[in-house]
C-alpha cells in the first residue's frame, strides 16, 4: 500500500490529522491497535479550548458539537468549605471553554473519516515505523494474521503515551523530562444531572475532588486516590460517600447519585519528549507529552500539535517548502511547556501531597486565597485555562 502520510493511532490526534490532511487533498492511512469500540469506550477529557473547537470546525466536525456542547464562562474553586468563582469570561475579555466529551470528539471524527472514505485500519497488530531517517519511510503491521506494508512520505506518531513511535527512536536522540505524582484520579461517570452548572475544583484535607459533566443529564466526578488503589475495591456507594465528604456542605447536599456507567483510575504524570521530529517521523499529542488532567490541557495540546503538523505537512506537499516542518518541534514545545507549567501549578494548588509539611499546606491555602481574591492572579489562571494563543 502507498500513501502520503502514515498515521499511527486513531485517538483524537491521529483522526484529526487525517481529516485535516484529507481536506487539503493529502492522502493518509491510520493504523490503530485497538478496535473502534474499545477506542470509543475510553472516557477521558471533557473541556475544550476555543482553539480546539475552531480546529474541529475547520475539520468539518463542528455540527453536533455546536448543537450539544455546553459553554462555560467560569469555574469554581472550593477550599475550607467555601466556594469562590473565577469569572474566566470576564477576566479574559470574553473567552469561554466548551464542555464536550473526548468520546464525542472521537466519534465525530471517526464518522467524518468514514463518510469521506478515509482509510482506518483497526486491530492492526505490531505496527512498526521503519526508515524514517531516510527519504522512504514505511510502516509494517499485521492484521488477521497477514503482514502488511505501507509506503509513505511521512509518518505521524499519534499513538499516545504507551505507543510505539517514540519507542522506535534511538534513545540517544531523545531527551525526556518527567515527574510522577504520588496519587491518581478515580473517575466515575453517571447518568444524573451535574451537581452545579460550573465545574468545581475542590481542595480538601481528604484529597482533591472535581465535579464536572458531559451534558445536562450526565455527570462526571473525580477524587484523588492512592496510586495503588483498585477500582474493584470501590462500590458506587463508597465512591459517593468519599466524594460527598470532600465537597462544601451545600454542594454535598445537592449531589444526585446513581449507578455508575464507568469507573476508572488514572495515574497522574508530567512528561515531555524532545524533539518531536526525527527525520520523516513526527510525534504529536500524548505520544510526545503528558500532563496531569487538573488543567484540562492534554487533549487541547494534542489539538494544537495537530494544528502545527497539518499546516507544516500541507506546506510541504503544496509548495515543497520545509520551513514549517523544520520549525514544528520548537513551535509545539513552546506551547507545551507553558501547558506543563500550568498543569503542574493547578495540580500543586489543589491536591493533598502525602509528603507536604504543615508549612507547605499553609502556603497552599495562601495561594488559594490569593488566586481567588486578586484579579491579577485570577486573570493568570483564567487566561491559561481558556487556552494560550497558538502563535
Ligand atoms: P490517545 O487518545 O491516547 O490516542 C492514541 C491512540 O493510539 C493507539 N495506539 C496504537 N496504535 C497502533 N499501534 C500502537 N503500537 C499503538 N499504541 C497506541 C491507542 O490505542 C489510541 O487509540 O492520544 P492522543 O490522540 O494524543 O490524545 C490525547 C488525549 O487522549 C489526552 O491528552 C487527554 O485525554 C487528556 N485528558 C484531558 N485533556 C484535556 O484536554 N481536557 C481534559 O479535560 C482532560 N481530562 C484527560 C482528562 C486524561 C485523563 N486520563 C484518563 C489520563 C481526564 C483523564 C482522567
Ligand atoms: C472532565 O470533564 O473529564 C474533566 C474536566 C476538567 C478537568 C479534567 C477532566 O480538569
Image: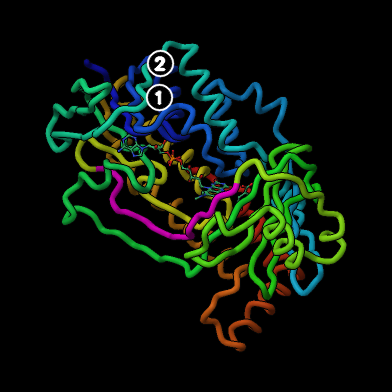
Say what secondary structure mark 2 lies in: loop
Magenta portion: prevailing SS class: strand
Residue 59: horizontal and vertical position, in percent?
52, 23
Q: What residue is at 50 percent from the left and 54 percent from the top?
A: 266
**Boundaries of the magenta span:** 263-277
The answer to whether mark 1 and mark 2 are in CB contact below 8 A is yes
Q: Residue at x 44, y 24 (%)?
A: 20
Of marks 1 and 2, the one in the foreground? 2
Pinpoint residue 170: horizontal percent, then vertical percent: 16, 50
Relative depth, front residue between 279 and 330:
279
Query: Within 10 angstroms of label 1, few (less than 14), some, or many (20 or more) residues?
Result: many
Which residue is the site of mark 1? 18
Residue 263 shows up from this direction: yes
Earlier sequence position, callout 1 versus callout 2: 1
Residues at marks 1 and 2, CA–CA distance in whole angstroms = 8 Å
Give how far across and how far down residue 110 sits, in percent.
49, 23
Q: Quadrant of residue 142?
A: top left
- Given residues 126 and 299, the one toward you in this image is 126
Query: What quarter of the picture does the N terminus occupy?
Result: top left
The stretch drawn in magenta includes residue 57: no
Q: Which residue is mark 2?
A: 118
Q: Which of the 4 image quarters holds residue 3?
A: top left
Where 165 falls versus 292 (above or below)?
Answer: above
Amino acid at each position: 500500500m502507498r500513501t502520503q502520510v502514515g498515521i499511527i493511532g486513531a485517538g483524537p490526534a491521529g483522526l484529526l490529522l487525517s481529516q485535516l490532511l484529507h481536506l487539503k487533498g493529502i492522502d493518509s492511512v491510520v493504523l490503530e491497535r485497538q478496535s473502534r469500540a474499545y477506542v470509543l469506550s475510553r472516557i477521558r477529557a471533557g473541556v475544550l479550548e476555543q482553539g480546539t473547537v475552531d480546529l474541529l470546525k475547520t475539520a468539518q466536525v463542528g455540527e453536533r458539537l455546536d448543537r450539544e456542547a455546553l459553554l462555560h464562562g467560569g469555574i469554581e474553586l472550593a477550599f475550607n468549605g467555601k466556594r469562590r468563582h473565577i469569572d474566566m469570561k470576564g477576566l479574559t475579555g470574553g473567552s469561554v471553554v466548551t464542555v464536550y466529551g473526548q468520546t464525542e470528539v472521537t466519534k465525530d471524527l471517526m464518522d467524518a473519516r468514514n463518510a469521506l472514505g478515509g482509510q482506518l485500519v483497526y486491530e492492526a497488530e505490531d505496527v512498526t515505523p521503519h526508515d524514517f531517517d531516510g527519504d522512504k519511510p514505511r510502516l509494517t503491521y499485521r492484521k488477521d494474521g497477514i503482514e502488511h506494508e505501507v509506503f509513505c512520505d511521512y509518518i505521524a506518531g499519534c499513538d499516545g503515551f504507551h505507543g510505539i513511535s517514540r519507542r522506535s527512536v534511538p534513545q540517544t536522540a531523545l531527551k525526556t523530562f518527567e515527574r510522577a505524582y504520588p496519587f491518581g484520579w478515580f473517575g466515575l461517570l453517571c447518568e444524573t444531572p451535574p451537581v452545579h452548572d460550573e465545574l468545581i475544583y475542590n481542595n480538601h484535607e481528604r484529597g482533591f475532588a472535581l465535579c464536572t459533566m458531559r451534558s445536562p443529564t450526565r455527570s462526571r466526578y473525580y477524587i484523588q486516590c492512592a496510586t495503588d488503589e483498585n477500582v474493584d475495591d470501590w462500590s458506587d456507594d463508597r465512591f459517593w460517600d468519599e466524594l460527598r465528604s470532600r465537597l462544601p456542605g451545600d454542594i454535598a447536599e445537592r449531589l444526585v447519585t446513581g449507578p455508575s456507567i464507568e469507573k476508572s483510575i488514572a495515574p497522574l504524570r508530567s512528561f515531555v519528549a524532545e524533539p518531536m521530529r526525527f527525520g520523516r517521523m513526527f510525534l504529536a499529542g500524548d505520544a510526545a507529552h503528558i500532563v496531569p488532567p487538573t488543567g484540562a490541557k492534554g487533549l487541547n495540546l494534542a489539538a494544537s500539535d495537530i494544528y502545527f503538523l497539518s499546516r507544516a505537512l500541507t506546506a510541504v506537499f503544496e509548495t515543497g517548502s520545509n520551513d514549517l516542518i523544520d520549525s514544528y518541534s520548537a513551535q509545539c514545545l513552546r506551547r507545551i511547556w507553558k501547558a506543563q507549567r500550568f498543569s503542574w501549578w493547578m495540580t500543586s494548588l489543589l491536591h493533598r501531597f502525602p509528603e507536604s509539611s504543615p508549612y507547605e499546606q499553609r502556603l497552599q491555602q495562601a495561594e488559594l486565597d490569593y488566586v481567588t481574591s486578586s484579579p491579577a492572579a485570577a486573570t493568570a489562571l483564567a487566561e491559561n485555562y481558556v487556552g494560550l494563543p497558538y502563535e
